[in-house]
Image (cartoon, rainbow, N blue to C red):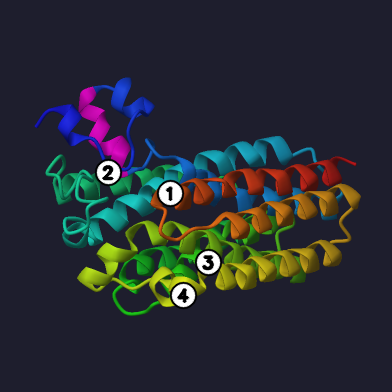
Amino acid sequence: MSDAAARVADSVGNWVDSRAPLWSRPYLRLSRLDRPIGSWLLLMPCLWSTALASHLAGDVSQLPFTIVLFLIGAFAMRGAGCTWNDITDRDLDARVERTRSRPIPAGQVTVTQALVFLVAQALAGLIVLLQFNRFAIATGIASLLIVAAYPFMKRITYWPQVVLGLAFSWGALMGFAVVLGRIDAAALALYAGTVAWVIGYDTIYAHQDADDDALIGIKSTALLFGERTRLALAIFYGLAVVLISVALHLAEALWPAWIGLAVFAAHLVWQIARIEISDARLCLRLFKSNRDAGVLLFAGLLIGALV
């Protein structure tokens, strides 16, 4: 198979297709390094909680090092999670137009090769995790059960986005565990708000595959909400803003953090106003824009911590 034919259908024109060595491309695609948006979205709650916990601690001296570790860990563990997802979903992926060109159903790598690659990425994540305190290490390991269960949820419930939210929001707890060595009420409120945010943006993402999913029996909130998606987004994004504001209040956050939250909320309102569930390209664009929303909130939290 030529490399041009081996490219993933919904990821073209990226650095993996044009610059990476040929032998590495299937593995980089398995870890989604050709589409790093998921890694950035996984990183955002880590950044938020690290900045907010540093504000509570009154100490930002470890902030740069902690952010670098979370950056490496987010990319490693998102890659591992995607590899696990592709292993468990290989038969389903082969039946969906957007995913049948992924490395395993396309025959670019075997399941055994993918498993070895999964272990390598997980070990990289473990090395990062071991740089933290014991409480943070235990907190990080606890997330693996949710990560392992997620790929199977779409087969049994219309709410797999909730389980994804529980996994992708774990960083909201990790920052507090690393910086403060504890998980307090502010961390739990931040976690709950982040879960609501993830449910919202992944519902947008799931609308790309809604027709194929319905045909092969995969469940999602996109199918559950259907034409009521705009209302559902308003509810979940509204919950996210309210719960994150509770976290800021409990942490006695300063004015820059509140400005960051206001801009974050405005971005979510823009997404709700723009959404057209029948437009797959627009759904992907709005989904990806959540990285920018997360950065805006982080900027406010970071400035608040530095102040």
Q: Is residue 196 above or below residue 284?
A: below
N-term mark: 4 or 1: 1
Instruction: Check disc 4 and report its element: helix, strand or loop.
Output: helix
Q: CA distance from mark 2 to mark 3?
A: 29 Å
Identify which amino acid the numbered label 4 is placed on: Phe
Instruction: Check disc 3 and report its element: helix, strand or loop.
Output: helix
Residue that numbered label 2 is attached to: 117
Q: CA distance from mark 3 to mark 1?
A: 17 Å
Residue that numbered label 3 is attached to: 199
| Front position among marks 2 and 3 | 3
Q: CA distance from mark 1 to mark 2?
A: 13 Å
The residue sitting at 42% across, 42% down in the picture is: 124
Q: Position of residue 280 (x, y in %)?
A: 39, 52
- Image marks 1 and 2: residues in contact by CB distance under 8 Å: no
Identify which amino acid the numbered label 1 is placed on: Arg
Question: Which label is found at residue 225?
Answer: 4
Question: Which label is found at residue 244?
Answer: none
Identify which amino acid the numbered label 2 is placed on: Phe
Q: CA distance from mark 4 to mark 1?
A: 27 Å
Question: Which label is found at residue 78?
Answer: 1
Instruction: Check disc 2 and report its element: helix, strand or loop.
Output: helix
Is-magenta flag for residue 100? no
The residue sitting at 22% across, 57% down in the picture is: 96
Secondary structure mostly taken by the magenta-highlighted segment of the chain: helix
Q: Position of residue 30 (x, y in %)?
A: 29, 43
Highlighted range, magenta: 22-30
- Image marks 2 and 3: residues in contact by CB distance under 8 Å: no
Q: Which quadrant is home to the C terminus?
A: top right
